[in-house]
Image: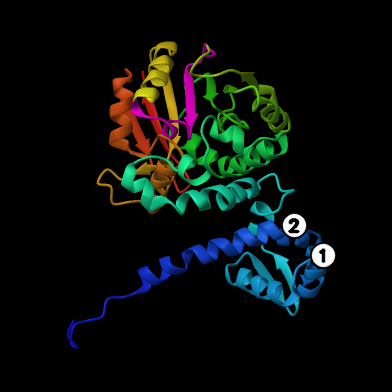
Amino acid sequence: MSATTPVPDPTPVLDLLMAFRRSKVMFAGVTLGVFDALEAGPKTAAALATELNADAESLGRLLDATVGLQLLTRTGESYANTPAAAAYLTSASPRRLTGYLRFTDEILWKLWGNLADAIRDGTHGWKRTFGWDGPIFDQIFHTPELRREFTMGMHGMGVISSPQVVAAFDLSRFKTLVDLGGATGHLAVAACRRYTSLRATVFDLPQVTPIARELVSASDVAARVDVASGDFFADELPASDLYSLGRILHDWTDDKNLLLLKKIHARLPEGGALLVAEKLINDDRTGPDAAQMQDLNMLLVTEGKERTLAGYAQLLKSAGFAHVEGRTTSAPVDAILAVK
């Protein structure tokens, strides 16, 4: 490169070079209990160090970095949670993401460390990274407490996304909704809040439904949301004119998804529909970044992948659906509606 050749802007490279450090600051704050400790009110670094059994000088450096990331504020010598930290990073918040953050830090972080190997052989990283075979999530969430905390972390993600998903299309013509693999019921609750004549059922595995009942019963639409236990691959689906699948199809291969989609299609009446919540990759595969990062995450964690709208349309039409439409949102997932 000659002296007269313009020097390319290094910002994208430098930003990515530092990106993992910013993530680790947030993860360390959650692991150490910083955000929980500040829920009672502002504290100094010295007071926090005593409470958290940490080195005061080192903790102060972490706290200052966390201020720079806009997760804490500092007034004089005292630190306090920002509203975002209080909502998403404290273990008592109903919107908390802490379970998913810990899963990311303790599990996904290690899987992503083997991304190059996954690209080379095209397989997920559980055996390579942890030596695990069999039901992977049973090994991770081997206690009810661990399962609950992860589920609540995914609930926090759902509370962010579901209101936008149910608003992406006009669903007012439907009378009933069955959310298959509906977890804590966040989508069913959001749908019933938006559509006041709708009744909904959360359908998920028996180990998940107790927390769904707990959270649904505490909602303002509890009278219109039921919870039922079952396996959507193996069991008969509850009757409905609208089904939903949130963050389900990206877990599986096309062949396995087709089995489920054909089953849903056969159960629907004419004019019934399936609402899908997944992150859409642009049809020309130029982005968005969040969808492409999640696509690589699926490579590392599952047998599935993220898809373009055209990819979902092909899959859904192969299952018998006549009309497929997609809408992007500003939430962590987008929305697709397939009509029979």
Magenta span covers which residues?
A: 236-254
Q: Residue at x 39, y 47 (%)?
A: 296
The one nearer the camera, 233 or 214, is 233
Quadrant holding the N terminus: bottom left
Q: CA distance from mark 1 to mark 2?
A: 11 Å
**Is 245 within the magenta?**
yes
Q: Residue 313, percent across and down?
A: 30, 30
Please state which of residues 264 and 205 is positioned toward the viewer in this rendering.
Answer: 205
Does residue 283 appear in the picture of this structure? Answer: yes
Q: Is residue 172 visible?
A: no
**Residue sitting at x 68%, y 37%:** 148
Q: Relative to 26, is 35 on the left or the right? A: right
Q: Pick out the residue farthest to the front.
A: 131
Q: Return the x and y of residue 264 as percentages of the image width and height.
A: 43, 17
x and y, in percent, of residue 19 in the image: 47, 64
Front residue of 236 and 27: 27
Q: Earlier in the sequence, mark 1 or mark 2?
A: 2
Residue 320: assigned label = none
Q: Taking 18 as reference, is 92 above or below it? A: above
Q: Position of residue 21 (x, y in %)?
A: 52, 66
- For the residue labelled by badge 1, is the local secondary structure a helix, a strand or a loop? helix
In the image, what residue type sits under mark 1?
A: Glu
Q: From the image, tell me which residue sits under label 1.
A: 51
Q: Which residue is mark 2?
A: 36
Residue at image position (53%, 13%) is 235
The figure's colour scheme reads: rainbow
Mark in the foreground, 1 or 2: 1
Q: Which residue is found at the position 82% from the left and 69% from the top?
A: 50
Q: Amino acid at mark 2?
A: Asp
Determine whether 170 is above or below 328 in the image: above
Q: Is residue 251 magenta?
A: yes
